[in-house]
Structures are given as structure tokens and as C-alpha cells.
Image: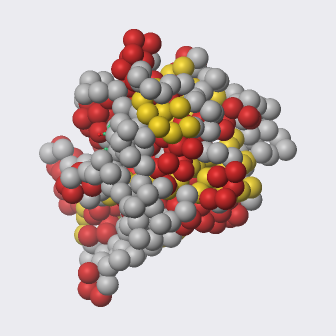
Amino acid sequence: MGILIEKAAQKAVTADIIFLTKSSTDIADLGLEKQELDFAKREIKEGKEVVEINRFKSRVFIVQFKSKGATLNKNEAARAMGNTALLMVNKAKIEKVTVSSVGFSKAHAIAFLEGMMLGNYQFLKYKTGDNKKVNSLKKILVFYGDISKEDIVELEIITKAVYSTRDMVNEPDSYMTAVQLAEEAKTLGKDAGAKVEVFNKKKIESLKMGGLLAVNRGSIDPPTFTIYEWKPKNAINTKPYIFVGKGVVYDTGGLSLKPSNFMDTMKCDMAGAAAVIGGMYAISKAKLPVYVIGMIPATDNRPDGNAYTPGDVVTMFDGSTVEVLNTDAEGRMILADALSYAKKYDPELVVDMATLTGAAARAIGTQAMVGMKVKSDKEFDNISKSGDRVHERIVEFPMWDEYAEQIKSEIADRKNIGGAEAGAITAGKFLEHFTDYPYIHLDIAGPAFLSKASSYRTVGGSGVGTRLFYDFIKSKVK
Ligand code: BES
Ligand code: ZN
Ligand code: ZN
């Protein structure tokens, strides 16, 4: 992993250092020389987020917390400042930096560090030679008594979880097959002391998971169905929370082939699965006393010899039938089987996360995910609050029954597409049929994969969902 963080025993005056301040009095107390102080004050007045003082043997960075006029919540503003400072630190080729809080609250200082850590992510596996430009920053020393060893450990866990999620999404499908995705879950589960079970194709066939098998028919690689279970002895709940992630490791559209300019980012179609794996890793590694299960149906979607066809009828795991009118609406086919399978656990709540529809992305862009709820008003409120806290926001779309009209089929129980209108909602209505418990559907087609960095959300896989799941489960523990 790219970056280490630890508590500093003392403030190293000669080393590169970032001061977190809130007021000009804080800055006056830093012990700067008169010229430096005047310079810092001037820069801040001009609106600089981070002031850099180059002492030639070392550099001092001064951050002044400003939230006035900010549309972001304060923690998010602090994360963004952390990322700005990080970019400057890397530009100055600094390897080790001390972060010392003078005026930041503990929560804001942690958010600042989180922004630094998450912003320092790089995916360089496929760069060689001079193209492999590794960020200089390797270590952060935290000088702030209020921040405990446990806080640092939690930051490390969250960072590793988000980095892993991004790695999984950024890996091209030639590497990240359904089998490999299951391997990633196993490796992380082992690290966290959680139980990870993987169903192979034979087992999936014997279970008659018709939706997952239909999508897999055009592939020469087998599907997998992974169950990541975290059931600590001290769990506060008996009925599990279940997270289900869409694991389409590559979506060509199948026989309803996508045009290449829509296909070229489709290695990201397992971002829901990656978020579930990353979230489960963080929850289990932090040993949160909550019984939680992650489920990942995975396959690629391709137009090979025996691929499922538009017009085909598929019998799903729950015994109901689906008329396939577009093989590109494959996410709901594999999620449906996982949602039906989840019933056997009598869950407290099931949340699925999926890069499900272009319609969701078109409606709200990269700034949020679309959320829909069934029998889960209170939990939806809770996860929305988590979304605001971690800045992975949720916009609610309706689950009105009228929309189910659009997925009625002439020859089967329902069809897998709902027409041109309200595509994100009809997809949710399709999934709803396969549930009988409190349920939340989250469509991350917008924020999952970024064409350019946005603050500490680096280019490519954004890692969205991982921190949301972690915060949501953590909020259950008082
Ligand atoms: N994986 C796509 C959705 C998607 C689009 C994710 C853009 C990320 C960015 C999904 O499988 C899909 O192709 N959906 C179709 C559904 C349609 C055929 C009903 C879509 O949105 O066009
Ligand atoms: Zn598709
Ligand atoms: Zn897809």
C-alpha cells in the first residue's frame, strides 16, 4: 500500500510540516518569522486553501479551515483540504510529512488525514519505466494528542478498503475474471478473519441460479457466487444485514452489443461487488460487533456461441420466469438470483449496490447514487445520513407500483427491460420482485468510475460505496 500513517511522539520542528489552523491567531502562534507570517496572512486573505513556505531545508504548509460559503459539509471540506495539501506535498517531492493540528477539531483533522490518504492512491500496475511516476509521499506523522492509536488504525483500515475497491475496479477484465474477483474476496476475508465461501459453476448449476447462468452462457469463463460472512460472537443483532454487489466483470452488452464508446469503461461493471467486498473487509477488519453478510454474483457478459438471446425465457432461482428482451440488462438477472438467495437468512435488511443503469447516471451524474426503498423507511434514512457523512450521497427515486406495468411480459412473469422511460426505476421494480424483506437498492452507475479525478476521488474506480457501507454498519454500534 502506498502510504503509512502513525502518531508522532513530538513535533519535529525542522521537518516538513502541515499546520491545521482555524484563525489568524492560530497562525500568529505558529512561531513563524515576521516575513513568513506576513506572507501567510496575505495568501490566506487572497483565498489560498493551503499556504506553502519554502525554507529550502524544509517546507511549512499552513491550512486555515474555512467553511463559510462552502456547499460541502465541514468534514468533506476538510477532506478536500487534505487532498489539496497532498498534491502540494507530492509536487515538492516530500516523502515524510508531519501533520500538526493547532485549530482543527479532532473530527476535522481526521477528515483532513482521510483526504490525504485517499488522494494518494495510484494504480500503476500497468505502467513501466519512466511512465511509472510514483507519488513521493510515503509517510504521515500525526502530531495531535486527541487523535488516538485506534483512530489511526481505523484510518488505515478505511484506506486499505478503499484502495482495494479501486484496485479491483481498475483491473482490466483480462485479469479480473469472476474467479479472480472471488479470490480477492478470499484474500481480504483471510486478512480480516472473516469467513468467505465461493460457489463454483457446478454448485451454481445445482442451485439453479438461472439468471446468473443465463448471463454466463456467452462466456468461456465460469461464474462465481461469493458469500463473505462476518458473524462476530459479540454481534448486537441476530438477523444479518446483507449487502449484495453486482459483479459483472465486463459488460459487452452480450448479443445486444454495446457500441464501443459505451463499452470501453465496462470493466467497472463490478464496482458494486468491489464496494461490497471493500466494505465487508473494513467492517470485519475493524471487528465491528455486527452480523453482516456480503454476497457477490459474478460473471462477464459476452456474445459468444451459446449466449442468451433477446427473446429467450429464463427460469430464475426463485422459480419465476423472465423474458429477456435485451441481454444488456444483465445486472438485474444476476442480482435477482442473489436477492432471492438472501431470503434464506431472514435478513434484517438487504442493500444491493450496482452499476445498473445508464438512466441513473444520466439523471444525476457522478455526484450521487440513486436509492430506492421497500419497507425500510428508517434504514433508508440511516443510510442516507451515512451517505451525507462520507459524501457518497443518495438521491431517492420512487418505487411506485405503476412503474411495474412497464415490465409486464406477454409470455413470462416479467421482462427484463421497461422501455425508454424511467429506466433506473423500472430496474429497481424488477429487483423488488425477488425480495420479501426490508430492502434498499442503490444504483451507482454515475459515481462508480470517473473520467478525471474529483478531489480525493482519484481517476478511474472511485471506490464509492465502501465507506458508505462501513459508516452505515458503524452507526449501528453505539
Ligand atoms: N452496466 C450497464 C449500466 C451502466 C451504464 C453502468 C453506464 C455504468 C455506466 C447495464 O448493464 C446496462 O447496460 N444497462 C442498460 C439497461 C437497458 C438495456 C434496459 C442501460 O442502462 O442502457
Ligand atoms: Zn448491460
Ligand atoms: Zn451491466
- The residue sitting at 53% across, 54% down in the picture is 298
Q: Is 386 or 126 nearer to us in this picture?
A: 126
- Count of marks, rendered view: 0
Relative to 439, is 331 above or below? below
Using the rendered image of the protein, determine whether residue 81 is visible from the camera's viewpoint: no
In the picture provided, is 288 more to the left or to the right than 144? right
Q: Is 454 or 201 nearer to us in this picture?
A: 201
- The residue sitting at 41% across, 71% down in the picture is 174
Picture quarter with the C terminus: top right
The x and y percentages for residue 304 are: 38, 61
Q: Is 157 or 248 nearer to us in this picture?
A: 248
The x and y percentages for residue 384 are: 48, 27
- The residue sitting at 36% across, 74% down in the picture is 124
Relative to 252, is 346 above or below? above
The x and y percentages for residue 313 are: 47, 37
Q: Is 230 or 437 nearer to us in this picture?
A: 437
The x and y percentages for residue 151 are: 61, 51
- The residue sitting at 57% across, 44% down in the picture is 210
Outermost residue on the bottom side: it is 129
- For the rendered model, the colour scheme is secondary structure
Using the rendered image of the protein, determine whether residue 264 is visible from the camera's viewpoint: yes
